[in-house]
Image (cartoon, helix red, strand yellow):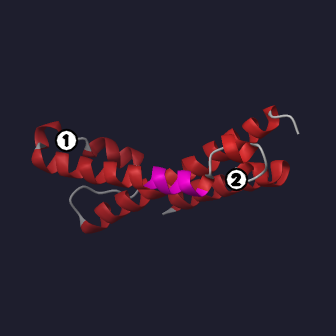
Amino acid sequence: MMPILYFAGIAALLFFALRFSCGSRVMGHSGVASRTGLPILDFGWALSLFLSITYLVCVAFDLLLPGYAMYETWEGLLPGFRWLTPAGFAVGLAESFLYGWYVALVFGGIYNALVARRRPA
């Protein structure tokens, strides 16, 4: 549980630092930047759902073809994940979803700040 809180805390700190230093440009909502910036909410939902669906497909793949399973790798990437337990499955799905939001907030915020900085005011 601590790694999830760690990543969430780091993402929140980076996002708020960008938000307060660059204003609404981080969210892709100001003037010209809104046409070229990433809308963070849409990007976050899309990326989180993509990673969640990918996780579900990978679990199905590992169950169908156990000789090619990658669940040992997931145990290192998804803290708290345990193969073939209901709690492990739920933790893996939740962390996949949260990783999507982490990337959307950090990458999307940085991207929007840089795009808005390059545009003339």
Residue 32 at x, y percent in the picture: 77, 43
Residue 95 at x, y percent in the picture: 43, 57
Report if residue 110 lies within the magenta region.
no
Q: Is residue 67 left or right of residue 24?
A: left
Q: Is residue 44 left or right of residue 13?
A: left
Quadrant of res 6: bottom right
* Dot label at residue 69: 1
Residue 83 at x, y percent in the picture: 24, 55
Nearer to me, 94 or 27? 27
The quadrant of the picture occupied by the C terminus is: top right
Nearer to me, 99 or 78? 99
Nearer to me, 103 or 1? 103
Tag 1: residue type?
Ala
Q: Label 2 neighbourhood size at 10 Å, few (<14), some (14-19), many (20+)? A: many
Nearest to the eye among marks 1 and 2: give it: 2
Q: Is residue 12 above or below residue 117?
A: below
Residue 91 at x, y percent in the picture: 37, 62
Residue plotted at (48% across, 63% down) = 1
Say how many tags the image has.
2
Stretch of the chain drawn in magenta = 41-48
Tag 2: residue type?
Met
Residue plotted at (81% across, 34% down) = 119
* Dot label at residue 27: 2
Local secondary structure at mark 1: loop
Local secondary structure at mark 2: helix
Which badge, 1 or 2, is on the more N-terminal residue?
Answer: 2
